[in-house]
């Protein structure tokens, strides 16, 4: 084929190309990048993009997981297997360890979302990472919609929405003082649907819990939580077996499942295309606390 | 399906948030939980109607002040296209944000209130869209329901704007009368304006042809990163990774590498999925050459008979983006142009441009936040310069403050016959 008459790329190829450009830019300009890898779908897609960006060389940075200790076992197993297949160094920053050695205190309600942040920051500090790839997307949340692709953070890891660097064309300003760092979001312009269409097109393997399966669940605050050692029903909360899947994968005590029959990638795409509830709104207890909870957490150094 | 990126600009009250809310709502992009949330907040604040602006105003300080302070990115898709909206606030002090949003836009959407007609801000937004060389401009005449869907109101605004736009470089202008509140001509054609022969806004956005806006003639491949696997399997592999900024690259093409001036031939154009026949903007690829020559990040691969001008003297329009310091003649900055970084000194400020009157103030000695001027720079190493009108990627650059590391200026290289 020598003729491509319209020189038009599909939306997925445009997004892929933009993400690859960003990853190469970071690796060219920063001494110690790291990619946050949880075993969730967005970070799995990021790993695929990183593979493509540096092919046929290996991915030139390690991956790190902030492990709350409240995980879905399927996801942890997937995380370890994937890192192993790609020959990546996997660094685990453990919230449980930080609780045990007293550097953070577990809140009385047992949720570990907020105490992830100091553990993340300690982990970054310890390894002197200056650029940190995260899988956040702007369609996830209103605060994220206004965050730059290169999100500059001071020595406390804090995001200051009023002090963001303008981003023009495909030029990114990666200059930071010693001690400051950059969070980099190569998936900024992807939507949940783009991610799923890419997973299909690239035949990317995901942990099973993203697809419909039978699970013991109970209802709390209008959401369905899977029964898990860290997420137990209260006396009045009825446990039933339902056909569900997870749209996001986070801390098991805060991540809810959705009712679904979508057991294949095609069915998931249909479901995502027709759903009328946002990804985080449907499944994340952590974002419901206040109208600005994501903004507040980012100011403290969260992703 | 392809992507259309567009930037929206408008004043505080001309209904921009309502228009975006309408596009998102009618394309089923606004979710029930988002509607629930803004209904709750609107009610808590004692507002009589559901405030669609709350969908786009994300930050606490914005809600507190009731204004939008930053570029927000929004996404929606129809079966035909994916859309990325750079939603920029319209206040006078936020030229910076409009410039940022317009830099990557295929299309700029400028809103006016039909009752008020063109205001200073509409002219400023149109000027910025033309300065940033956004190829398509849509003037949306909003609130037509409040002027009785009057054709004469629309005609008058159209005539006035067309006359103004003739002074600017706007290759493609479309003017659409709408009511964002009621939905006239946003997604569906309105029955209230029989006199309007054009399409609805969404139909226009879905069908406008943007692929040919990219420069497919002048081959420009800024080398971003050199891939050397250091493995047994790929022992001698050396690939030049980057994003195509212009033209079409093919195996067998003769190429010239700047600034060294070495020539070679393309051995292959590759992605992780294998060789590709052709690479064109905005593809990220890896180029391999037949000869082993010394190439590193910041170099530019082009064609022997079609090359940018390597120069240390840059003549450019600069939009100043920093509130903490002004551009000063004699001061040094970092400059980032394609994948090349250097230092530069401001040799001269020719004039500052008043973007309302287009008057040139040649006595100006500095540029402050949101001010635009014609500047002469001298860089430590040659930059592979194209004029911005020829290529937005290889004609644009940013200035970075050496002390604070802030991005302080956006530059567009002037024509000068390049």
Image (spheres, grey):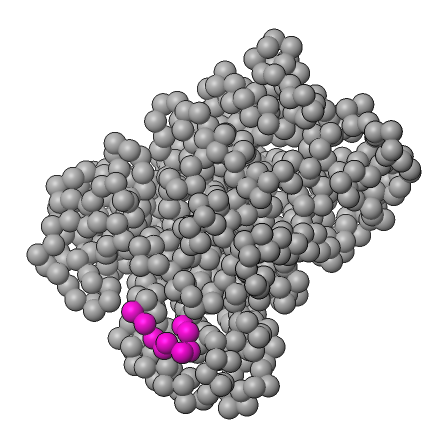
Query: In the image as oriented, which residue stretches furthest toward the left?
Result: B363
A239 to B124, vertically: above or below: above
Q: Nearer the viewer, residue B303 or A297?
A: A297
Q: Quadrant of the N terminus of chain B?
A: bottom right
Q: Which residues are magenta?
A: B112-120
- At x 50%, y 70%, the residue is B209
Q: Quadrant of the C terminus of chain B?
A: bottom left
Where residue A101 appears, as percent x and y from the top left, is: 61, 8
Where residue B237 appears, as percent x and y from the top left, is: 51, 33
Q: Quadrant of residue A40?
A: top right
Q: Nearer the viewer, residue B146 or A245?
A: B146
Left or right, residue B115 beside residue B306: right
- At x 55%, y 90%, the residue is B194
Say if the magenta span includes residue A65. Answer: no
Say if the magenta span includes residue B118. Answer: yes
Left or right, residue A282 beside residue A24: right
Q: Quadrant of residue B274?
A: top right
């Amino acid at each position: 084929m020598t003729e491509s008459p319209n020189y038009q790329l599909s939306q997925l190829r445009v997004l892929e190309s933009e993400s690859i450009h960003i990853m190469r830019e970071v690796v060219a300009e920063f001494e110690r990048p790291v990619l946050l890898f949880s075993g969730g779908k967005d970070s799995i897609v990021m790993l695929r993009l990183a593979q493509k960006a540096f092919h046929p060389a290996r991915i030139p940075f390690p991956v790190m997981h902030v492990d709350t200790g409240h995980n879905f076992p399927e996801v942890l197993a997937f995380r370890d297997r994937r890192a192993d297949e790609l020959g990546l160094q996997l660094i685990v920053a453990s919230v449980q360890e930080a609780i045990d050695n007293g550097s953070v205190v577990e809140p009385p309600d047992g949720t570990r979302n907020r105490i992830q942040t100091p553990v993340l920051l300690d982990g970054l500090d310890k390894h002197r990472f200056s650029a940190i790839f995260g899988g956040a997307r702007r369609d996830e949340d209103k605060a994220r919609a206004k965050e730059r692709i290169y999100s500059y953070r001071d020595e406390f890891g804090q995001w200051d929405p009023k002090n963001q660097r303008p981003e023009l064309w495909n030029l990114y300003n990666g200059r930071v003082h010693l001690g400051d760092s950059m969070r980099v979001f190569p998936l900024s312009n992807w939507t949940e649907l783009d991610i799923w269409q890419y997973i299909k097109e690239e035949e990317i393997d995901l942990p099973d819990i993203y697809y419909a399966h039978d699970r013991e669940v109970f209802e709390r605050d209008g959401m369905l939580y899977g029964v898990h050692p860290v997420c137990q029903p209260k006396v009045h909360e009825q446990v039933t077996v339902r056909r569900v899947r997870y749209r996001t994968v986070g801390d098991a005590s805060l991540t809810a499942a959705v009712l679904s029959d979508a057991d294949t990638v095609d069915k998931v795409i249909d479901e995502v295309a027709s759903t009328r509830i946002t990804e985080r709104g449907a499944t994340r207890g952590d974002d419901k606390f206040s109208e600005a909870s994501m903004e507040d957490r980012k100011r403290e150094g969260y992703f | 399906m392809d992507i259309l990126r567009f930037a929206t600009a408008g004043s505080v009250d001309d209904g921009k948030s309502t228009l975006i809310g309408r596009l998102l709502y009618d394309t089923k992009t606004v979710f029930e939980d988002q509607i629930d949330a803004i209904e709750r907040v609107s009610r808590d604040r004692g507002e009589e109607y559901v405030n669609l602006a709350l969908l786009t105003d994300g930050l606490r300080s914005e809600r507190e002040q009731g204004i939008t302070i930053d570029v927000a990115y929004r996404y929606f898709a129809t079966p035909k296209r994916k859309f990325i909206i750079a939603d920029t606030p319209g206040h006078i002090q936020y030229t910076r944000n409009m410039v940022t949003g317009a830099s990557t836009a295929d299309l700029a959407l400028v809103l006016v209130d039909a009752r008020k007609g063109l205001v200073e801000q509409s002219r400023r937004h149109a000027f910025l869209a033309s300065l940033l060389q956004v190829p398509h401009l849509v003037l949306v005449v909003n609130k037509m329901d409040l002027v009785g869907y009057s054709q004469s109101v629309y005609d008058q605004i159209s005539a006035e704007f067309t006359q103004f736009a003739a002074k600017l470089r706007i290759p493609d202008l479309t003017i659409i009368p709408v009511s964002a509140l009621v939905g006239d001509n946003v997604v569906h054609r309105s029955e209230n304006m029989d006199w309007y022969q054009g399409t609805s806004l969404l139909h226009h956005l879905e069908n406008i042809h943007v692929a040919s806006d990219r420069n497919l003639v002048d081959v420009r491949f800024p080398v971003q990163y050199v891939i050397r696997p250091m493995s047994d399997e790929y022992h001698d592999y050396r690939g030049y990774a980057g994003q195509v900024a212009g033209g079409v690259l093919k195996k067998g093409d003769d190429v010239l590498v700047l600034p060294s001036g070495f020539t070679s031939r393309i051995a292959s154009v590759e992605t992780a999925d294998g060789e590709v026949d052709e690479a064109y903007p905005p593809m990220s690829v890896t180029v391999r050459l037949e000869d082993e020559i010394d190439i590193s990040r910041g170099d530019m691969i082009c064609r022997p008979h079609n090359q940018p001008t390597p120069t240390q003297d840059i003549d450019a329009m600069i939009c100043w983006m920093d509130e903490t310091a002004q551009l000063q003649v004699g001061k040094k900055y970092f400059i980032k142009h394609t994948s090349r970084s250097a230092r530069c000194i401001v040799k001269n400020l020719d004039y500052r441009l008043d973007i309302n009157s287009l008057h040139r103030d040649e006595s100006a000695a500095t540029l402050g936040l949101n001010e635009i001027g014609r500047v002469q720079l001298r860089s430590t190493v040659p930059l592979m310069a194209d004029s911005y009108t020829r290529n937005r990627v290889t004609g644009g650059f940013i200035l970075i403050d050496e002390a604070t590391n802030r991005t302080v200026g956006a530059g567009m290289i002037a024509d000068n016959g390049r």
